Structure formats: structure tokens, C-alpha cells
Image: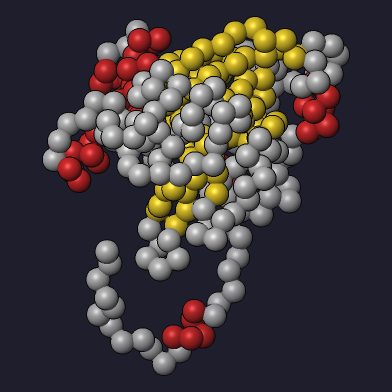
């Protein structure tokens, strides 16, 4: 909790507070995905691979550029923490902060997941979301957030004084280490802030603290993405289950998540091209 104010408000306090907000990143000039092409392409999909994520664990998966992948709940309500990398260069990874700045705190159909600097390009486009009906609730909550950082053993240790090894950060670290054949310290440098798939979150109206509440996801719900580049993904089935009570413990009921990878058949994507990295020169004013 924050300390109460220690300084008296100045005489022009109201005028300062009444300053009109300005959107930091107007997106009128942001290149937008051709959703008509993606809608047509997803009409003829063939399942080519699938991966099941066990409760309180994570697995990696690969999606070739120009393919679709779905994250679904096959059993009970379950939240997942998603990391994405360029499959050919894992130094390029999902940038949740920039995605949040461009698309808002929660994402859905038509939004894109952007990569970190200096690459700064869309890695994936959300093409379908069976929870898009949820919108915003009376608490200020919504689904699929790019606010939270992932539950991790370090914060858990600070707040609770104990070591819990199945936080999403640890799950993602184990999965990536196994797939890439890296040691744990090296692997941790590549694990990054997540898309909290199916998680329902927001900020409280009074103290503006980050909150979670029981996810509205139910059996059969899914979110679908189009891979704009070759992707290596990792998904953790959060130990918080539906995140309606707690996370980073063995207390919540947890369920598996499914990854399904699809290829579009036909000619819908014949003119589609993978986006190039940012064209910025990289000189930073020094050359």
C-alpha cells in the first residue's frame, strides 16, 4: 500500500489534474493485418501437430510461418503463460510491453504480438478468440492480458519465504532448456514477460493494484494465432489453475492445455509474405 500524501496540494492542483490525456502511440499509421485473408485461410485448415501441456508444467512447440496455432482448454478452466521466440534466433522474442502500448492491456482478435527491439515486427496475429464476448466486467477486468509478468519463484520467495519450483517462470525455463539444450542460467535470460492466455485481470478502482479473478474460460474455448514468422513457443499451465484464488502453490485445481498447429490448404495465402524486421538504421544518431 502507498503512503498517504505528505505534501499539500498546490492551488492549481485541479487544473493540473484536469489536463487531457493523450494516447502515447496513435495507431492510425500502424500497418494492420489483412484479416479478410486470414479469415479465408482459416476456412480450410488441416491439423498437422498437437502438444498437450500438463498441469503445473510447460512444453515447447514450433509453428512455421504462415501456419495457425490454437491454445485450448480440453478439460477444466485453466490459465496459460505464453512465451514466443523467433525459431531461428531466440534473441528475438515477444515484447509484451510494446504490445500493451500499441493494443492495450488485453488483446483479442485482430491484435498482434510484437517482437523486441531492434526487430520490432509482428510475430503473431490473433485470428479467433472464443472469449471475445467477455469485454470488460464491472471490476475493470478483461481476458488475455499483457500486464502480468508471469508468476516466478523469486517474487514468491520474497513474499512467502519459501521455494516453489513450478511457477510459470520455472516451467518455461525448464521447457526451453530442454528444447534448446541450454543450461538453466543461460536459459533464464531468454524467458520473458508473457501473454497471460485466458487469465482475467485488471487494476482495482481504489488502489489500482493488479488483480486476478476466476477465468471465464470453459471446456472447448480457444484462442487462435497466425504465425507471421517461424515461431518457437513455450506454454505453461499455471499452478493457479483458473487464477480465481491463488497461484504459485499446489492449492488450486489445475488442468492441461492443448496446442494445435494447423496448415491452411488452398491459395488464400499465396500473396502473403512474412514481415521484415524494423527498417530503422540502428545508428542512434551516431553515424
Residue 67 image offset from top left, x and y in percent:
68, 16
* Horizontal side, residue 173 vs residue 282: left or right: left
Q: Depth check: 187 or 61 in front?
A: 61
Residue positioned 40% across, 68% down in the render? 206
Q: Depth check: 121 or 176 in front?
A: 176
Residue positioned 59% across, 54% down in the render? 136
Q: Depth check: 111 or 255 in front?
A: 255
Quadrant housing residue 43: top right
Q: Is residue 166 above or below residue 216?
A: above
Can the viewer see residue 203 in this picture?
yes
Residue 135 image offset from top left, x and y in percent:
63, 50
Can the viewer see residue 192 in this picture?
no
Residue positioned 25% across, 80% down in the render? 6
Residue 78 image offset from top left, x and y in percent:
46, 31
Colour scheme shown? secondary structure
* Horizontal side, residue 268 vs residue 200: left or right: right
Q: Is residue 251 above or below residue 201?
A: above
Q: Is residue 101 above or below residue 166?
A: below
Quadrant housing residue 192: top left
Furthest residue in direction right, as rendered: 267
Quarter that holds the N terminus = bottom left
Amino acid at each position: 500500500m502507498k503512503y498517504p500524501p505528505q505534501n499539500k496540494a498546490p492551488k492549481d492542483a485541479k487544473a493540473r489534474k484536469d489536463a487531457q490525456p493523450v494516447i502515447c502511440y496513435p495507431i492510425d499509421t500502424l500497418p494492420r493485418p489483412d484479416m479478410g485473408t486470414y479469415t479465408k485461410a482459416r476456412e480450410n485448415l488441416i491439423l498437422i501437430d498437437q502438444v498437450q501441456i500438463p498441469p503445473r508444467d510447460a512444453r515447447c512447440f514450433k509453428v512455421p510461418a504462415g501456419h495457425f496455432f490454437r491454445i485450448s482448454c480440453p478439460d477444466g478452466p485453466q490459465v496459460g503463460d505464453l512465451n514466443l521466440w523467433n525459431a531461428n534466433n531466440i534473441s528475438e522474442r515477444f515484447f509484451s510491453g510494446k504490445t500493451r502500448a500499441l493494443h492495450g492491456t488485453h488483446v483479442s482478435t485482430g491484435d498482434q504480438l510484437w517482437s523486441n527491439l531492434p526487430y520490432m515486427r509482428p510475430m503473431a496475429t490473433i485470428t479467433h478468440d472464443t472469449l471475445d464476448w467477455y469485454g470488460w466486467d464491472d471490476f475493470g477486468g478483461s481476458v488475455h492480458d499483457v500486464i502480468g509478468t508471469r508468476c516466478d519463484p523469486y517474487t514468491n520467495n520474497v513474499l512467502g519465504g519459501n521455494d516453489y519450483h513450478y511457477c510459470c517462470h520455472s516451467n518455461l525455463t525448464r521447457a526451453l532448456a530442454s528444447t534448446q539444450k541450454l543450461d538453466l542460467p543461460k536459459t533464464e535470460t531468454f524467458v520473458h514477460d508473457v501473454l497471460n492466455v485466458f487469465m482475467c485481470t485488471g487494476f482495482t478502482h481504489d488502489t489500482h493494484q493488479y488483480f486476478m479473478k476466476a477465468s471465464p474460460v470453459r471446456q472447448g474455448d480457444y484462442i487462435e494465432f497466425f504465425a507471421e514468422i517461424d515461431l518457437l513457443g513455450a506454454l505453461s499451465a499455471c499452478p493457479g489453475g483458473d487464477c480465481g484464488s491463488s497461484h504459485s502453490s499446489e492449492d488450486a485445481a489445475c488442468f492441461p492445455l492443448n496446442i494445435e498447429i494447423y496448415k491452411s490448404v488452398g491459395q488464400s495465402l499465396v500473396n502473403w509474405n512474412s514481415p521484415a524486421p524494423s527498417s530503422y538504421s540502428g545508428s542512434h544518431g551516431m553515424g
